[in-house]
Image: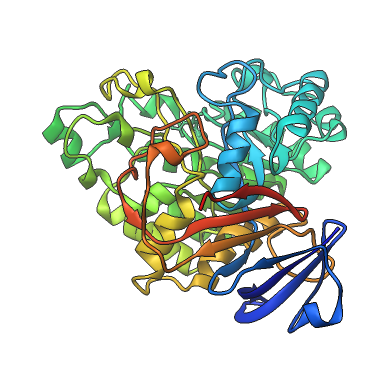
Amino acid sequence: MKRLIKNGQCLVNGHLQVRDILIADGKIAKIGQHLSAQTPVDQIIDAQGLFVSPGLVDVHVHLREPGQTAKETVKTGSLAAAHGGYTTIAAMPNVIPAPDTSERLKAMLALNQRDGAVHMVQYATITTDRGGDELVDMAGLKAAGAFAFSNDGNGVQTAGTMYQAMQQAAQLNMAVVAHAEDDSLTFGGVMHEGNVSKRLGLPGIPSVSETAQVARDVALAAATGAHYHVCHVSSAATVQVIRAAKAAGVNVTCEVSPHHLLLSDEDITSDNAMLKMNPPLGSEQDRRALITGLLDGTIDLIATDHAPHTDAEKAQSMLKAPFGITGSETAFAMLYTKFVKTGLFSLVQLINWMAASPAARFGLNAGQLMAGAPADVVLFDLTTPFTIQAADFLSKGHNSPFIGQQVLGKTIRTLVSGKDAYISRP
Ligand SMILES: NC(=O)N[C@@H](CC(=O)O)C(=O)O
Ligand SMILES: [Zn+2]
């Protein structure tokens, strides 16, 4: 089956240019001009006026299966990713049971393979059931196909446990991917501790609960040589710790989520669980430091932390609702509209942070349009405004603070290995 994506504005080698992309056997066979005149194809996809991007790569999603399928399944979560323009996703291991043994990981991989609408890789846990201090069999889990190790949802509380995990991960050449949170510094908070939490009378989480653990962990990464990746960095002080660690040559990378770039605690004007996530939205100063961190290379990439919950759970007050918001279906359009249209980021930068950079940091064969690469391609409409609506989500989760926003950057079509994973309704 040969397909040709014709006349799109293609992002190739860091430049936008009108090109045709010839797809054969699931791969990009050729990128050039007037390719249809040269090669007979089975189908032509007209991309005139559309932006043709490498498929996006999200190294942080929660798909809830097995265990919490009322919130999401592998099928719905991966379809949501395809709808958002993602063609490769890394699933976090906070499912029930957690993939903390080779047997459980293999079952998880089989489920992903069966139901995944996009390419999927799977995190294994760092410790048994993501809690306590009993390390998993890292070598066994690597052999069984683990992508990396993470206890996401919780920090590893004991330094010695993290130290041993990093020692083994370094030997295995695997990344330790950390949700950094010192539980002794969160004080049962539900939002960022600051003026806004005081005004609303809601218990606050000091941002040092993140920074203190990242400071500990970069020291452990320096001592062990492990690749230490920090999830969803949220505070200015944490960015500064990572900046200093990188300057000192520590093997550390990190991600920021769209909501921490787009929102701050000042956007929380009432008790609204759609704005409750972990780590919480920081101060406006934190938000600006995250943008600076991306622009100066301290922050390597953008990952959504797509965290679906049921409508009923998120209808509760901030005191009761679970932490987390969805992100797969809103990330590109929100970031494009708020940062590229306003001139703060270039489109090339944004796509680098959402595709090539995550792929490169984690050694994934993805993130770039080039001959020989898998035909993971997205067509975005950058000119027709649309409104983000819950009814359009393919995720089971509707817990997005971006519902109702008028944006640009609608996904028209997502191809995964040359096959349609998402096509927009006319
Ligand atoms: N981010 C969140 O607020 N929640 C995530 C867990 C996590 O990423 O820490 C979840 O699984 O719901
Ligand atoms: Zn987390």
Residue 279 visible in the picture: no
Quadrant assignment for the N terminus:
bottom right
Determine the residue located farthest toward the left in the rendered image: 199
Viewer-proximal residue, 248 or 426?
426
Tell me where residue 405 appears, x and y as whole percent: 31, 50
Question: Is the residue 411 above or below the residue 212 in the image?
Answer: below
Tell me where residue 391 appears, x and y as whole percent: 41, 36
Viewer-proximal residue, 3 or 183?
3
Q: Is residue 226 left or right of residue 209?
A: right
Q: Is residue 391 left or right of residue 61?
A: left
Question: In which image quadrant can residue 379 be found?
Answer: bottom right
Tell me where residue 330 appears, x and y as whole percent: 44, 48
What residue is drawn where x is 60% and y is 29%?
151
Tell me where residue 154 appears, x and y as whole percent: 52, 27
What residue is drawn where x is 45% and y is 37%?
326
What residue is drawn where x is 38% and y is 49%?
260
